[in-house]
Amino acid sequence: MRLSEEAEKELSYLTDCGSELARKQTGSYYTPTDVSAFFWNEFFSLGEINTPQEATSFVNKHTFVEPSVGAGAIVFSLLLKLANLGVDKSIIASIDLTLIDINKHALSFVKGQFDSLSRQWGTDFPNIKLVCSDFQKVRFKQGKRPYFFFGNPPFVTNKRGESKWNNSFADFVETSLERIGKIGSLQFILPLSVAFSRDYSNLRKYMLEYDRCISLSHFDNIPDTLFKSGKPEHTNSNKANSQRCSILTVRPASKSRIRSTSLIRWSKYDRKEVLSKSPQYHEVSSYRFNDQFPRPKNYLILEYINRSQDHGQFSELLSKKGKYKLHVGAVARNYIGFREGPVSSTHQLCFDNKRNFYRALLILGSDLFFDYWKTIGDGFHVTKGNILSFPMHNQLDEIVNSKLTTTQRIWAARETHKKTKLNSGRITFSYDFSKKMPHLLYETKILEKVLQN
């Protein structure tokens, strides 16, 4: 495992010159050992594979395929997981495993590692096949065993006309879904956009073509990251760090089911704890608010969204020619920011009267909207669509109206809530009302009224 992780970064370069541009063009981001361990711990936990007998059955019943093996960090972590569960080494050595990569140097390294392991164990790995090819060009025969596809496919923007998908990872997922049919499984580390982007709406529908259990764990990219490489040419910390990711698991089931975690954020000091335990999943099978797999911040906001979807929307407060204007920051992390005037990176919202201005300010600055955004947003951008589609439950107005006097006082004293930030060499500021704005989700217990209906 240690050698694989060390080799992954070096072998992610296809060219001898070690061009960072060439690496990024192949989408090669190496998988750290702790992420590989989490990857398998989570799969075995979700599949309730807990004993040597259950793990042995799992190995014997599947044909395993890793479409982009790299230096083997994930596949060797699988062998380690099986060994730690007490699976006999003869069973592990008999695994039916196809390892694919376009990088011949990476495959050569993996072969050497298997040769070394074979000598240590005193046994061959007769069913391992190493294939130097583009995964999309490999033909698979349907045998008696169902396929299980796994790994960390490349994240590369497709050239126009090459694919119906914007990014190559979607090609890997689609091909794998075709191969597993009704009875196979897959697990991949993917960009977070697989869960919400309209570009992959049809891919999400394809996942639900058959009765399957779909599980997604979601990971932020600040302050710590799953991957240790990112986009170093960017000075923006969000882009310079490795991107936000989801681990997608698809397994056959008697009835379709979708489970999803919140967007997990952690510091490097908490990394070991975060990756050593299973995250909390929320049942989102009945979610119909929009065409995505949500990342519920908590159970309450999920209930609010589900029970408010047939009510009004925030957009009904706005007026295109209204003279009262509110400027909402287009990016967020720990709070929804507000700005003075029509500056860059803001959304200008117009209202006919002061009452609607303050209603909007209270809602957008509240814990209710922030938790909603964390559930349906991408964890960084606050889009105009996020704002306009916010569901306005009928009973929300009653609570908001009772808090408008407090909201007016907060706005009048907004200078005391100013925060500054250095952005591309320029100092920018925004107002953070998150600690002062009246709570709409918890203190007023709006969900108690919603749930009574």
Image (cartoon, helix red, strand yellow):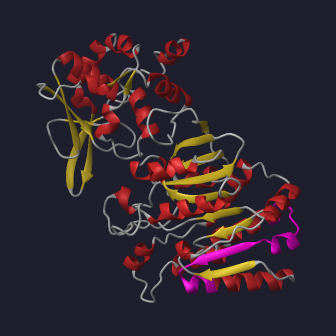
Q: Is residue 62 above or below residue 341?
A: below
Residue 237 located within the stretch drawn in magenta: no
Callout count: 0
Work out whether residue 152 can be spotted. yes
Q: Considering only vertical position in the picture, is 26 above or below 226?
A: below
User: Residue 74 appears at what percent x and percent y?
Assistant: 65, 68
* x, y percent for residue 366: 37, 26
Place residue 364 in its image quadrant: top left
Magenta residues span: 83-108
Residue 283: x %, y % from top left: 61, 35
Q: Residue furthest bottom?
A: 16
Q: Residue at 65% across / 56% down in the picture? A: 181
Residue drawn at 28 percent across, 32 percent down: 417
Give the percent coordinates (x, y) of residue 271. Answer: 58, 54
User: What residue do we see at 55% from left, 80% from top?
Assistant: 133
Q: Does residue 288 appear to the left or right of 139 in the view shown? A: left
Residue at 42%, 63% in the rendered image: 167
Visible residue check, residue 222: no
Q: Is residue 84 left or right of residue 135?
A: right
Q: Is residue 369 above or below residue 153?
A: above
Residue nearest the observer in this picture, 151 or 5: 151
Quadrant location of the N terminus in the rendered image: bottom right
> Would you identify the image quadrant in which residue 419 lies?
top left
Observer-nearest of 240 and 67: 67
